[in-house]
């Protein structure tokens, strides 16, 4: 079998089906990554969302004993919204990060990988493969993409393609076919440190090392209280955060609209914050269920929507927030509402906190209410 020729045929097919970048890597262990993962875990920098053991994540043959190569793919996603609805006083809107726009990329990439697999199945009798996207698989998308020459690994830990910046989704397929590998790209960051300097929480602790526990993108997906010191830093982001991408010179002017699946619906990716607080489970599933940003359910998004209303000091949302503080069955939501009411700073808001404290039983919520009432004292 002439694998170079098959590789060229597969590259041509990948273009036909709209894959922007494809690269080929060996299936040798990712030894450097293994020691980095161990360090991340020792330092407490891991997110906890990673799948598999460190061995499974760095040794492709553990996932597929016949592994010979890994095919990496990248799809570019848009960065600008047509008819962008403005978030204005009295009608504030939240923001999903760009990587959550359109249909969940896991589904779109998996379909592309399935098409590649079907193509190879027709050409090679004993073709075997295992494909994966993001946390749906054990391998590190970024380590594979870097080795396969899709892009270089930036100081912000993201894969940066010279053509598409870091606004790309990654997926990969382990195969039993010995495709000739591509060459990794050389580091393109040079002396730039814009992403490290711009990160509001210092989560990029050194070039190429992220403390996920401090990363605002990760924190938007947690289900407990947002750490107090980070509450005001999210702005109107309710899912994800992307300052380390926005400031990157490689992303300047990047905005590809190649895939209709990734086109953002303005009312979904920038939803009205107050509407989000009243949404039923069923309505949430119907409206947001196909977006990547819905994977943790509605509670983190509602908590973040409340934080955004506090950030904006949105007086028009005060009555809604007071209702939420008094009536929502979830302590995180009631307590966060108390914080936002205090941030807004209206006298009747503080009165409402005092009233609600009289019938509140949850210790964490009472603590949030006390913090809110301290804000009142500080404001005088
Ligand atoms: Fe590299 Fe600068 Fe982009 Fe950070 S902002 S990833 S340092 S080029």
Image (cartoon, grey):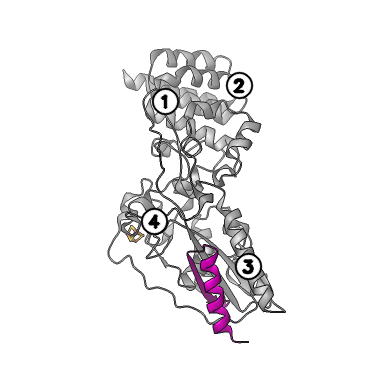
First in sequence: mark 4 vs mark 3: 3
Whole-number angstrom distance, CA of label 4 to CA of label 3: 26 Å
Please tell me whether mark 4 sits on a helix, a strand or a loop: strand
In this image, 20 relative to 286: left or right? left
Quadrant, the N terminus: bottom right
**Looking at the image, which residue sits at the far right?**
126
Residue 220 place in picture, x, y as percent:
50, 42
For the point 32% across and 54% down, which residue is it? 253
- Segment colored magenta: 1-29
For the point 61% across and 54% down, which residue is it? 107
Q: Name the residue under label 1.
A: 91
For the point 30% across and 55% down, which residue is it? 194
Of the numbered discs in the image, which one, if any, rests on residue 83? none
Whole-number angstrom distance, CA of label 2 to CA of label 3: 45 Å
User: Is disc 2's CB within 8 Å of ligand 1?
Assistant: no
Of 364 and 107, nearer the camera is 107
Of 155 and 278, nearer the camera is 278
């Amino acid at each position: 079998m002439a694998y170079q020729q098959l590789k060229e045929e597969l590259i041509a097919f990948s273009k036909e089906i709209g894959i922007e970048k494809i690269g080929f890597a060996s299936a040798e262990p990712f030894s450097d990554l293994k020691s980095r993962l161990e360090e991340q875990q020792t330092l407490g920098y891991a997110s906890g969302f990673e799948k598999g053991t460190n061995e499974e994540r760095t040794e492709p043959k553990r996932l597929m004993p016949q592994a010979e190569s890994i095919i990496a793919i990248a799809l570019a996603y848009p960065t600008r919204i047509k008819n962008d609805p403005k978030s204005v006083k009295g009608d504030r809107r939240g923001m999903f990060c760009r990587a959550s726009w359109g249909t969940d990329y896991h589904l779109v990439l998996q379909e592309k990988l399935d098409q590649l697999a079907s193509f190879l199945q027709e050409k090679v009798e004993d073709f075997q493969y295992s494909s994966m996207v993001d946390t749906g698989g054990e391998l590190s998308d970024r380590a594979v993409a870097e080795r396969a020459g899709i892009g270089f690994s930036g100081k912000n830990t993201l894969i940066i393609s010279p053509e598409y910046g870091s606004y790309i989704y990654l997926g990969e397929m382990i195969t039993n076919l010995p495709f000739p590998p591509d060459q990794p790209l050389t580091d393109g960051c040079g002396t730039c440190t814009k992403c490290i300097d711009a990160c509001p929480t210092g989560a990029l602790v050194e070039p190429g090392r992220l403390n996920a526990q401090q990363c605002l993108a990760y924190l938007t997906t947690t289900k407990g209280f947002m750490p107090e010191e980070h509450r005001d830093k999210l702005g109107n982001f309710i899912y994800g955060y992307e300052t380390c991408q926005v400031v990157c010179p490689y992303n300047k002017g990047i905005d590809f609209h190649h895939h209709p699946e990734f086109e953002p619906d303005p009312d979904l990716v920038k939803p009205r914050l107050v509407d989000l607080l009243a949404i039923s489970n069923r309505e949430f599933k119907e409206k947001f269920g196909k977006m990547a940003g819905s994977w943790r359910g509605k509670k983190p998004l509602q908590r973040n929507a409340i934080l955004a209303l506090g950030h904006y000091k949105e007086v028009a949302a005060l009555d809604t927030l007071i209702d939420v503080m008094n009536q929502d069955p979830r302590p995180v939501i009631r307590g966060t509402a108390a914080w936002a009411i205090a941030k807004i700073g209206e006298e009747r808001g503080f009165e409402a906190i005092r009233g609600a404290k009289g019938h509140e039983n949850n210790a964490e919520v009472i603590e949030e209410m006390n913090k809110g009432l301290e804000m009142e004292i500080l404001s005088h």
